[in-house]
Image (spheres, coloured by chain):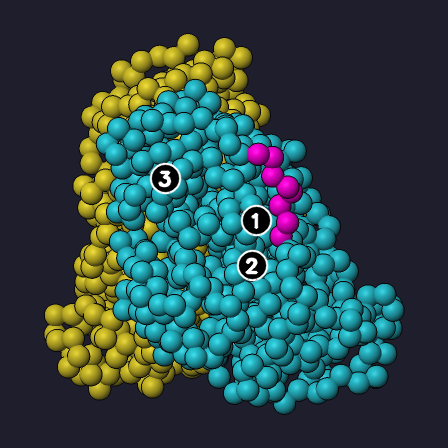
Chain colours: A yellow, B cyan
């Protein structure tokens, strides 16, 4: 039987950065990972700074260590560089001039959007110059008929979504970090998120890209057309290459129509098998109105109820699901959803649940799911894994890892996008330990490879995963990646030490 | 008022190749386009043939001129090469050995799937060896849960769709040539088709690709996972590059669930303005169940009623639309469709129409739209253009071209994918004329460029459009394309004279 949604209290606004967490700085990456050696790049000197000051003025060149600090540390405080220079261009032309100069002087550059990446891809490893896109945040155009928004790379995802929704449209992607992440970063990491199931990935939604190559060449592929087969589809080189082949400066994205009817259900289930059954039923019964299908285990929900004091509107179960519908006809959607819920509950596949179409209550349910990443930071140090697996093996890694680590881990939890076969495995430990790391890696990647999964579903490779990329990419494919990198960035100045194995 | 569907008689089965058309051979490409010079490639000799015979046996190496003829001529009989050798590998390993050998001996290769391309991309320009994928037509696996089909490149689109439909799935693309075209060719040209509006393009639907580079290296990116962010997204290099960067040998495609409820409407309208209004209403009223939205002008419909003797179930109008819904609930879909149709008809936006959910009648309506390409061949010689335009300018080229050509053209017609902003402009003339060509090109591309459109929406660049690619691609983008080609195929053996401007 469905229960009403009563126990969710008003939530404080979603805080993406955990300002209340420990202020202590993480170890420098160069010390924690002594095997990684600084490349043969120039070191920043006054002449370089003079050039940047001349180009951008004083205010858009940060060189005071305290000003640079936040740009050197990643969101989960796992890596830390020591860049002494942060540049904030406002135009593509400035980005082009910066890269052209850095390429000539062999200065390494780390592009950074909202710095919400989870694989250490968006902060310097050593002293790379940070090129922040944060001031490139203009919306250039929105076409109501075609649904296409053209904007600069530094636009914040949530801001874009807000503007589009006023015009009856929406962004085709949504993720927990939406309040901070930049669309340029989303595109550069091929971010997935909560509605990929419905609206597809960015290779489909992004219609055009303008990017700057390492030598400063501007590649203008900023088409706003849904179909364009004139030659190589160059934009895809920049989607998911994490700023190593070029810096994305503008994007054109196709925004679907905003649904007229939204419903959200939180379900409690007794087993992972029940989750699979429920997903199958949701696909069948909700079909074209299914817009999200997420799962979390009890230890993931506990993160937000314990650490962030959020309240769950249903009782305690080993597993939970969040199922969203988006449609054009409230009555039709309700009928489909009721048939689905009555089916899964009467057959005992779902043990308990609540469903709502009230915006505040939907927000509260989404917070339970979206704020897990934030909540986990309170556990201490996190080993985070973002794995694609065949759906039947979706949850296999969690119990295996739990058993392997025993009391070494304070929490082994799993949650993620069941509809896309993408689980986020998190191992919480009080603090970083090389011994535990050795127990976890490469075991977690070996296991993923056994199941023919991917060692990075949506977070990317960044700094953390290049040594393990061969678990998901063939030798010839890696070799082709290296050829591409060499062709597009022969001096290797763009986001070095990332993505490509050494 | 909606009329019933009474006048459509049973249609003969859809014939993709016009075997009844004139048997006369088109002029050789080298004679019709004397400015194109043969590259510095080796000429086929007995030693080469001996190697191919040793590798493939006698039956899979065609070298008799009459056997080679059909591989030298394109579907619309606009170009004709004089290849003296057609190879029919059955495995990726054979493709790899062929390419490795050809690369070493500087033998040019033209990959060919179903040879249904419309820009001369799939036939030799001079004497390139044809590598036909027609015998690589095994389905490797179908996963009912994930909906992923893995198959060889030579599988025919319609056959794949038939097999998937038996399992409750469908192919995410559909096009008029489905009975002949190969999935490898679809992927290599990034084919669009009739349902891109709903299921997106192949950059989104294709999960994995195996391809062979010019040097014979096999690039295995045959992932079946919906999400995989491990490094550069290499598969996109092969989607839409028309066999110039590698030959696609296997693909993994995500097939959506087969809809439980299908409806198809044929509408008659008085003006293009009415088409725009109807499309807007369809997007709004049909929303998530809208699966196709096509238009054709009276001269396009006349092609199939006059030449192919198909019967239209509605009266004569200047414009027609085909609107399809695909959903999971018959009653809901019918309610949405009725509300839509009642709205557009009561307001006079649509003048007349018929709607059906009977398979035979739906097939008959689709034939009116899908067989236009085939029917046009009966007009004589065709200048075909496949243009993306902002939706408001969608039809602008047709009246402009009609006025420009006057009595030079026997027919100037336009039809296509209104929902994707992609029109097929066809200019029929009794026979090829360089003078008419000069009147049409580059005018048609200049006009497209003025509207910020694309000179190839879905057909590709092939042999016909490289000189005009700059109308849709910037200089830096073309330069990057050339860099890519040089890196991946330094000897330029793969599909030369295509895609890249000289």
Residue carrying label 2:
B378
Position of B144 relative to B501 (above/below): above
Position of A36 relative to A339 (above/below): below
Disc 2 chain ID:
B
Other-residue count near label 2 (Cα within 10 Å), few / some / many at <14 / 14–19 / ≥20: many
What residue do we see at 42% from left, 40% from top?
A: B322
Position of B189 relative to B288 (above/below): below
Question: Quick one: label 1 or label 3, which is nearer the N terminus?
Answer: 3
Residue B220 percent location from the top left of the image: 63, 60
What residue do we see at 67% from left, 45% from top?
A: B159
What residue do we see at 78% from left, 71% from top?
A: B66
Residue carrying label 3:
B268
What residue do we see at 38% from left, 12% from top?
A: A2
Are the residues at dot 1 and dot 2 in contact (C-beta closer than 8 Å)? Answer: yes
Numbered badge on residue B308: 1
Count of numbered badges drawn on the protein: 3
Asked if badge 2 and badge 3 are on a common chain, one would say: yes
Residue B178 shows in this picture: yes
Residue A485 percent location from the top left of the image: 48, 73
Position of A165 relative to A6 (above/below): below
Instruction: Name the element at disc 2.
Output: helix
Q: Give, as a single range, the part of the protein colored magenta.
A: B9-16
């Amino acid at each position: 039987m469905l229960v009403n949604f009563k126990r969710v209290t008003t939530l404080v606004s979603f805080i993406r950065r955990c300002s209340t967490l420990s202020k202590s700085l993480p170890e420098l990456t160069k010390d924690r990972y002594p095997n990684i050696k600084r490349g043969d790049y120039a070191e920043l000197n006054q002449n370089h700074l003079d050039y940047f000051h001349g180009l951008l003025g004083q205010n858009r060149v940060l060189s005071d260590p305290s000003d640079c600090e936040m740009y050197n540390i990643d969101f989960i405080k796992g890596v830390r560089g020591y860049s002494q220079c942060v540049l904030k261009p406002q135009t593509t032309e400035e980005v082009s001039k910066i890269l052209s100069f850095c390429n000539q002087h062999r200065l390494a550059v780390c592009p950074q959007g909202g710095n919400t990446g989870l694989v250490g891809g968006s902060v310097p490893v050593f002293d790379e110059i940070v090129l922040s896109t944060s001031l490139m945040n203009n919306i250039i155009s929105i076409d109501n008929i075609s649904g296409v928004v053209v904007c600069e790379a530094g636009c914040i995802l949530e801001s874009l979504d807000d503007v589009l929704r006023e015009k009856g449209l929406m962004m085709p992607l949504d993720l927990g970090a939406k309040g901070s992440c930049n669309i340029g970063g989303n595109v550069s990491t091929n971010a997935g998120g909560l509605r990929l199931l419905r609206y597809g990935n960015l290779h489909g939604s992004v219609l055009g890209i303008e990017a700057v190559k390492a030598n400063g060449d501007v590649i203008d592929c900023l088409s706003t057309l849904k179909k364009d087969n004139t030659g190589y589809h160059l934009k895809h080189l920049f989607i998911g290459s994490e700023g190593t082949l070029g810096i994305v400066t503008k994007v054109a994205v196709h925004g679907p129509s905003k649904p007229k009817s939204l419903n959200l259900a939180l379900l409690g289930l007794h087993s992972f098998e029940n989750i699979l059954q429920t997903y199958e039923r949701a696909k069948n019964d909700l079909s074209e109105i299914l817009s999200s299908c997420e799962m979390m285990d009890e230890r993931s929900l506990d993160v937000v109820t314990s650490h962030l004091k959020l309240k769950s509107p249903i009782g305690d179960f080993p597993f939970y699901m969040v199922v969203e519908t988006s449609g054009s006809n409230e009555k039709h959607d309700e009928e489909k959803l009721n048939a689905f819920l009555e089916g899964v509950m009467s057959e005992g596949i779902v043990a308990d649940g609540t469903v709502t179409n009230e915006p505040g209550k939907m927000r509260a349910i989404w917070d339970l799911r979206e704020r897990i990443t934030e909540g986990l930071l309170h556990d201490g140090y996190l080993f985070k894994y973002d794995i694609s697996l065949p759906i039947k093996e979706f949850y296999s890694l969690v119990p295996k890892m739990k058993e392997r680590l025993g009391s070494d881990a304070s929490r082994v939890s799993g949650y993620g996008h069941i509809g896309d076969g993408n689980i986020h495995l998190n191992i919480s430990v009080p603090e970083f330990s090389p011994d535990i790391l050795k127990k976890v890696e490469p075991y977690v990647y070996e296991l993923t490879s056994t199941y023919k999964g991917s060692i990075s579903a949506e977070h990317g490779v960044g700094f953390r995963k290049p040594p393990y990329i061969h678990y998901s990419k063939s030798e010839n494919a890696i070799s082709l990646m290296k050829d591409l990198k060499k062709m597009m960035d022969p001096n290797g100045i763009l986001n070095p030490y990332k993505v490509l194995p050494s």
